[in-house]
């Protein structure tokens, strides 16, 4: 069906070209009487294309306005981290600047192209240089950019430089592999145990060095929970290729590099539940659910299964090409109140215990160990999530 | 062959060329030619063919993005049952298409196709030289380019797929066949092809630099060079400085892949086993890659800007505004381009302090760029604009250069880069500022110098249609991408509907794809016009655009040595358009100054 449509479009395009050539040709009929067509622009061409230039200016403006009205709401809304508003502010300033400069320069460019379109008897004004003018438009960008650079560097320093000693922070390791994420919390001692992929064995899938005393109380999970209002310092590791940990709603991103530990820190300020009540997010969710229900109707008509309705969740996405299923490498991020977060964390087994238990069993199986604790609902959810994501990865 | 090349050179400077010109056979004239004009045409045709492949690929993956995982007959036909089972594109083949599209467009079309064509054509003709400094090396340069193109195309037929690690081929993904199928034989061919390409590019660039420095005709001082030549010259210099670094990166990657070294790899656990690599760093590769990769942007863009400077001045019938400022901008851009590579790596894990440094240098580059844009606009002011297709494409270039360049302020700012890095915002930015702009420069150059290359005119009406549809579609494709980028949609995603977060971006993707298909379809108008006009176009006069530069003083016939008699001597700069005191609105460079005529520019 779609290919038929495309063929139809191509045929129509062919007709359009043919007709357009005719029109252009007709506009030159008068000219061909007087002089032979030399394939060099004559006054009529200058006139037609001059007006089209002016029209194109209109196209740029209208398309810009149309885009902002139609797609403006798609842009990420309320930031959910402490540095987010500062980021958004800098972005807004830069955007305003861009829009102003864009509007003015495109106007001048296309308006001049229209206004000074050639006529046979006109002569151009010989104007080769003007030091004052050139100085002005060198110095204006210098001043404006100096301002932007200073603000940008101030924000950059605030966001990126992490003082490990000073801050009371939660340390979380985010571990990437083709095509999924795992997390490890530092536990009660607040220190992550050493790790290297050479220690990977059984349920110790992140290669934590179990002989390191700091590692015993570490807690692993397959869903990232964060406490609201507490600085979280992420340490990123990858076991295979480059990945990038991208938290769009928190204005945070850092590449995950095999063979080294990278870091990024931010303070979540809005819990998942609060974000679900954000008006922009509510609009977005209902919009997406409309789209999904339409798609579901189509799917059911074709004998497929309906799509699940969407509820908002923060996501951690992979944003560095990492292989075939790169597009589906994501993890749910849950921001809770500190109390809820602590409760969730305390219900988890420490890595030391989990490893010992799995070694105690005659046949250590990766999946069996968490299954041994069926009372824990959250764990079961996470298992489901894990199995799901691997299933998707294998299908592709 | 080199002996022949030298002979013609030495002799031509003193005698009329025709009487003792060696007989060209078909092979020496059209295939292993050492004449720069023929080599330029060879570059152009090869570049156009590669361009067709590259753009076809983009249409294929745009269709996948708009209608994810749907079955298309065209996929079945072009990709085959292996790459597109039942007509549904495989997800790793999507990445392969994206990778090869990027590689072909950046290197094969916009570096070799653009710079190779016009540097070869224009450097000898515009500086008044018989040929390049070394015609033989020039020929080798083209044939190495041809071989590398062939190898790149061959890599498309590897069973496990061609290179699929993105055009930046970051290891470990590009080093490990276990990580993605395309990193096997496909990547090997990619690396071999690129190594040969770099050799070709270096030979070309060395030739351009030597020619510009040594073979200028009498009176052609550096400040009388057309801006095209300045652009090609500086482009060649940054090519010589930066391409060897990519070669070293490619060689080290070949070592890692084939000989078990660990330059870029460390601590890898994949497919259930620990690999032996230890101590290398992928970030090192990123540094080496972008040390070329960023200058590469300007290697692509500067020739296009040079071409438009010339075309805008000619068709405005006005001197280019601020000739010296334009040269200074080219020099500043070239210098800064070599110290900004880190802005591709703000969040690569390198020290954030470096991020601050690179933010600073990157935003500095906006200054010469802004000067260039303002100077173009002022050149139009009070001109007598002859809106030929080449002129339209040049104005279009200034428009997309501004639109795309402005978003560079956001991406060059390390803070703002955090959240738009590797999203569609980046895709929109660089396609407008270097992809579309450079393509416009290439089209402008083709329309403008077609008469010089083939002795015939291209049809202007088809040219107008080509421009207007392309201009609308280019904005139609890339403007909406800013929005889906700011919605957080990462690039290089096979589909954005695998999870619900981006479901609302799907109709934008469909619109983008429609514009892309229409825009690509209208390139057929150009292709028809180009190939038809080579054989059946209207015969061109010697100087159809009434231009000042020396190439229009040479006869159209194919002739090794360019001018039948003496090489023209140069008496003035190339931009004496509409100069008061002259009857015509142009004064070619080889016209001596009148008695009492003053130089009116600085």
Image (spheres, coloured by chain):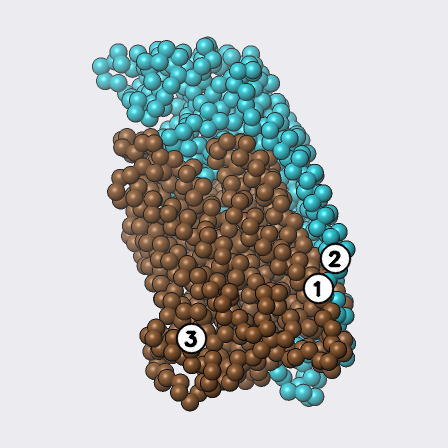
Chain colours: A cyan, B brown
* Residue B35: image tag: 3
Q: Position of residue B212 (x, y in %)?
A: 51, 66
Q: Position of residue B591 (x, y in %)?
A: 64, 80
Do marks 2 and 3 share a subunit? Answer: no
Image quadrant in which you'd find residue A113: bottom right
Query: Badge 2 sits on which subunit?
Result: A
Q: CA distance from mark 1 to mark 2?
A: 10 Å
Q: Is residue A188 left or right of residue A58?
A: left
Image quadrant in which you'd find residue A81: top right
Mark 1 or 3, nearer chain start: 3
Comparing labels 2 and 3, the label whose residue is closer to the camera: 2
Q: CA distance from mark 2 to mark 3?
A: 42 Å
- Please report contact status of discs 1 and 2: CB closer than 8 Å, yes or no: yes
Per the image, label 3 sits on a secondary structure element best described as loop
Crowdedness near tag 2: few (<14), some (14–19) or many (≥20) residues, C-alpha within 10 Å: few
Do marks 1 and 3 share a subunit? Answer: yes
Comparing labels 1 and 3, the label whose residue is closer to the camera: 1
Label 1: which residue?
B602
Per the image, label 1 sits on a secondary structure element best described as loop
In this view of the protein, which residue sits in the foreground, B488 or B427?
Answer: B427
Label 2: which residue?
A131
Query: Badge 1 sits on which subunit?
Result: B
């Amino acid at each position: 069906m779609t290919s038929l449509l495309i063929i139809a479009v191509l045929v129509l395009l062919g007709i359009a070209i043919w007709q357009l050539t005719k029109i252009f040709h007709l506009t030159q009929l008068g000219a061909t009487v007087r002089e032979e067509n030399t394939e060099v622009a004559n006054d009529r061409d200058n006139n037609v294309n001059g007006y089209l230039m002016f029209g194109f200016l209109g196209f740029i403006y209208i398309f810009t306005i149309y885009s902002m009205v139609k797609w403006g709401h798609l842009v990420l809304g309320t930031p959910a981290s402490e540095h987010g508003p500062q980021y958004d502010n800098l972005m807004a300033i830069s955007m305003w600047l861009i829009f102003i400069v864009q509007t003015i320069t495109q106007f001048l460019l296309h308006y001049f192209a229209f206004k000074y379109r050639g006529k046979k008897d006109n002569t151009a004004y010989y104007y080769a240089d003007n030091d004052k003018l050139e100085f002005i438009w060198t110095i204006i960008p210098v001043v404006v950019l100096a301002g932007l650079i200073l603000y940008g560097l101030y924000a950059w320093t605030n966001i990126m430089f992490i003082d490990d000693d000073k801050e009371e922070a939660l340390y979380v390791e985010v571990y990437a592999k083709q095509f999924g994420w795992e997390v490890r919390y530092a536990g009660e001692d607040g220190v992550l145990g050493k790790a290297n992929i050479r220690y990977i064995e059984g349920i110790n899938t992140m290669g934590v060095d179990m002989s390191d005393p700091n590692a015993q109380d570490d807690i692993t999970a397959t869903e990232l929970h964060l406490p609201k209002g507490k600085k979280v310092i992420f340490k990123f590791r990858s076991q295979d290729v480059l990945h990038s940990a991208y938290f769009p709603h928190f204005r945070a991103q850092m590449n995950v590099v095999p063979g080294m530990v990278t870091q990024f820190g931010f303070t979540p300020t809005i819990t998942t539940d609060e974000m679900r009540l954000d008006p922009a997010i509510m609009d977005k969710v209902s919009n997406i659910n409309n789209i999904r229900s339409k798609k579901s109707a189509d799917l059911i008509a074709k004998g497929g299964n309906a799509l699940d309705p969407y509820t908002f969740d923060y996501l951690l996405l992979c944003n560095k090409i990492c292989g075939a299923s790169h597009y589906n490498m994501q993890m749910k991020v849950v921001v809770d109140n500190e109390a809820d977060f602590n409760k969730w964390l305390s219900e988890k087994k420490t890595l030391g215990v989990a490893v010992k238990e799995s070694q105690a069993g005659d046949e250590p199986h990766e999946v069996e160990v968490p299954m041994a604790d069926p009372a824990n609902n959250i764990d079961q959810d996470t298992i489901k999530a894990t199995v799901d994501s691997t299933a998707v990865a294998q299908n592709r | 062959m080199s002996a022949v090349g030298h002979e013609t050179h030495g002799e031509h400077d003193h005698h009329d060329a025709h009487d003792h010109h060696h007989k060209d056979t078909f092979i020496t004239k059209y295939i292993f030619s050492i004449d720069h004009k023929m080599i330029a045409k060879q570059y152009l045709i090869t570049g156009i063919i590669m361009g067709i492949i590259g753009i076809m690929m983009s249409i294929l993956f745009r269709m996948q993005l708009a209608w994810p995982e749907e079955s298309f007959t065209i996929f079945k036909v072009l990709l085959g049952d292996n790459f597109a089972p039942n007509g549904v594109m495989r997800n790793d083949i999507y990445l392969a298409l994206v990778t090869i599209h990027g590689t072909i467009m950046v290197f094969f079309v916009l570096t070799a196709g653009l710079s190779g064509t016009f540097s070869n054509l224009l450097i000898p003709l515009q500086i008044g030289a018989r040929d390049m400094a070394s015609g033989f090396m020039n020929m080798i340069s083209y044939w190495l380019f041809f071989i590398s193109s062939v190898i790149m195309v061959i890599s498309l037929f590897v069973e496990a797929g061609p290179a699929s690690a993105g055009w930046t081929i970051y290891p470990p993904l590009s080093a490990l066949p276990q990580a993605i199928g395309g990193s096997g034989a496909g990547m090997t061919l990619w690396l071999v092809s690129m190594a040969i390409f770099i050799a070709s590019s270096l030979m070309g660039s060395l030739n351009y630099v030597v020619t510009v420095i040594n073979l200028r005709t009498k009176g052609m001082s550096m400040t009388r060079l057309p801006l095209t030549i300045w652009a090609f010259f500086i482009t060649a210099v940054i090519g010589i400085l930066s391409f060897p670094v990519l070669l070293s990166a490619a060689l080290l990657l070949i070592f890692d892949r084939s000989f078990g070294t660990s330059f870029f790899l460390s601590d890898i656990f994949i497919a259930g086993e620990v690999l032996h690599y230890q101590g290398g760093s992928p970030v090192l590769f990123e540094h080496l890659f972008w040390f070329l990769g960023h200058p590469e942007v300007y290697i692509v863009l500067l020739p296009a800007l040079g071409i438009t400077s010339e075309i805008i001045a000619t068709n405005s019938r006005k001197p280019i505004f601020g000739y010296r400022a334009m040269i200074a901008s080219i020099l500043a851009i070239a210098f800064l381009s070599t110290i900004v590579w880190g802005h591709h790596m703000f969040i690569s894990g390198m020290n954030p302090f470096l991020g601050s440094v690179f933010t600073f240098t990157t935003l500095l580059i906006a200054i010469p760029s802004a000067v260039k844009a303002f100077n173009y606009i002022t050149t139009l002011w009070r001109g007598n604009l002859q809106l030929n297709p080449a002129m339209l494409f040049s104005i279009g270039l200034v428009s997309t250069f501004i639109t795309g360049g402005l978003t560079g302020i956001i991406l060059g700012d390390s803070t703002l880069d955090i959240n738009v890095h590797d999203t569609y915002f980046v895709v929109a930015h660089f396609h407008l500022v270097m992809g579309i702009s450079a393509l416009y420069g290439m089209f402008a150059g083709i329309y403008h110098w077609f008469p010089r290359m083939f002795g015939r005119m291209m049809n202007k009406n088809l040219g107008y249609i080509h421009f207007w549809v392309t201009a609308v579609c280019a904005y139609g494709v890339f403007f909406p991408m800013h929005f889906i980028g700011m919605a957080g949609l990462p690039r290089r995603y096979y589909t954005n509907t695998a999870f619900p977060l981006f479901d609302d971006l799907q109709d934008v993707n469909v619109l983008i794809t429609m514009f892309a298909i229409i825009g690509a379809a209208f390139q057929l108008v150009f292709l028809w016009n180009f190939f038809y006009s080579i054989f059946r176009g209207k015969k061109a006069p010697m100087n159809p655009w009434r231009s000042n530069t020396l190439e229009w003083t040479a006869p159209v016939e194919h002739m090794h040595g360019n001018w039948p008699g003496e090489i023209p001597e140069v008496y003035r700069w190339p931009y004496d358009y509409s100069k008061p005191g002259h009857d015509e609105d142009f004064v070619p460079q080889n016209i001596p100054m009148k008695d009492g005529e003053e130089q009116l520019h600085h």
